[in-house]
Image (cartoon, rainbow, N blue to C red):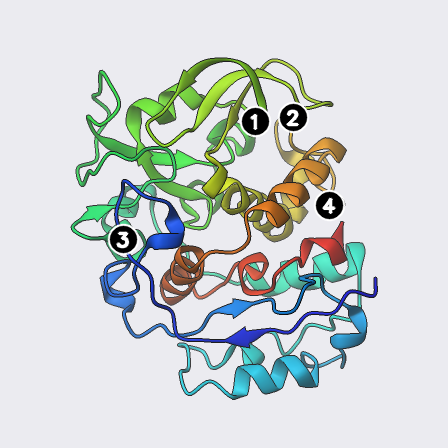
Amino acid sequence: MKNKWILTLIFISTITSCDIKQSNITSSEVVSSSSNVTSEIISSSSSSSISSSNISSSSSVSSSVSSSFSSSSTSIDNGSLNSYYRSIDFNLKGKELKTRLHYLIDDAKSYSYNELPELYRQTDYGNGYILDIYSNCKQNSFGSSYKKEGDILNREHIIPQSVFYKKSPMRSDLFHVLPTDGYVNNRRSNYPHAEVSNINFTSTNGTKVGSSKTSGVSGSVCEPADEYKGDVARIYFYFATRYEDKFSGFKSYACFANNSYPSLSKWAINLYKKWDKEDPISQKEIKRNEAVYKLQKNRNPFVDIPNLADLIW
């Protein structure tokens, strides 16, 4: 892999509305409790791929990455990003790199399932309402009673609870359990995330449910809106990395391979890497990553490091 990229830290500034795309969400409104977050890691130049020649040292990130991290005047709870990833040797690839990251991000604080709605006010709040990747409806209330889109919010497990038998810490991991419209969540059911044909439902923001047109997976699937496809892909990458030691005990799920590596099925790797590139890391994701870090004390490295998936899969 010879593509080069540079990680740069910049102040975050965006505009929030539930009616527009996530690229327009403001730092002053999203996650009000984390308004001091100022780091954004983005790729620059015409290429956004990671080059192993740019990432070196067995005990720290590369000098170029380290320089970028240390140049920021803003620190996070447990130190700079450079400090957080200091134990990772990014010269590694594939299974070995994934496992090193697993040990790092699996060191996390857990919350109860019932605590999540209140925690979302720290991780997903903006302009007076909870932000939602499945719907444009502006909502704040959580519950289980709904008849149509826009009635109420509930907790959406990007990876269905049945896959891990509702066990902790997966059941309440804020990185993959998101606030979403209850009705749309119900329409998604426990279907894999893939591309849809023969659409039988479309939400207000373009989330679709229907039969699969993705080679390798059949039956009903859920296709996120274009501006959230990368978000969903990076959540799957996180889950496959953090919980790789548990995959052999999970219930069969179309997106997964029941092993520690690659953990994801071949079609899912191909599709989610495609989504990862087509919908790059957004400022909303970076804000949320920081806010969840403040609570769980772990991070989603696939949000911190663009195209990290290319080194692993």
Q: Quadrant of residue 207?
A: top left
The residue at 75%/76% (across/down) is: 54
For the view shown, which residue lies furthest in the front direction?
A: 46
Indicate the secondary structure of the residue bearing disc 1. loop
Indicate the secondary structure of the residue bearing disc 3. loop
Q: Is 185 in front, or is 19?
A: 19
Q: Quadrant of residue 151?
A: top left
Tell me the CA gap for discs 4 and 2: 16 Å
Decide which of tag 2 and tag 1 comes sooner along the chain: 1
* Callout 2–callout 1 Cβ contact below 8 Å: yes
Indicate the secondary structure of the residue bearing disc 2. loop
Decide which of tag 3 and tag 1 comes sooner along the chain: 3
Decide which of tag 2 and tag 3 comes sooner along the chain: 3
What amino acid is found at the position of numbered circle 4 in the picture? Ser
Task: Report the mark closest to the observer, 4 or 1.
Answer: 1
Q: Where does the N terminus fall, quadrant-wise?
A: bottom right
What amino acid is found at the position of numbered circle 2 in the picture? Ala
Q: Which residue is mark 4?
A: 260
The residue at 62%/33% (across/down) is: 250
Q: Is 150 in front, or is 143?
A: 150
Q: Which of the numbered marks, if any, corresponds to residue 16?
A: 3
Q: Using residue 79 as the reference point, say whether residue 99 is left or right of it.
A: right
- Compared with residue 158, is residue 15 higher up or lower down, i.e. above or below? below
What amino acid is found at the position of numbered circle 3 in the picture? Thr
Decide which of tag 4 and tag 1 comes sooner along the chain: 1
Q: Which residue is mark 2?
A: 254
Task: Report the mark closest to the observer, 2 or 3.
Answer: 3
Q: Which residue is mark 1?
A: 192
Decide which of tag 3 and tag 4 comes sooner along the chain: 3
The residue at 81%/75% (across/down) is: 53
Whole-percent x and y of residue 189? Answer: 44, 21
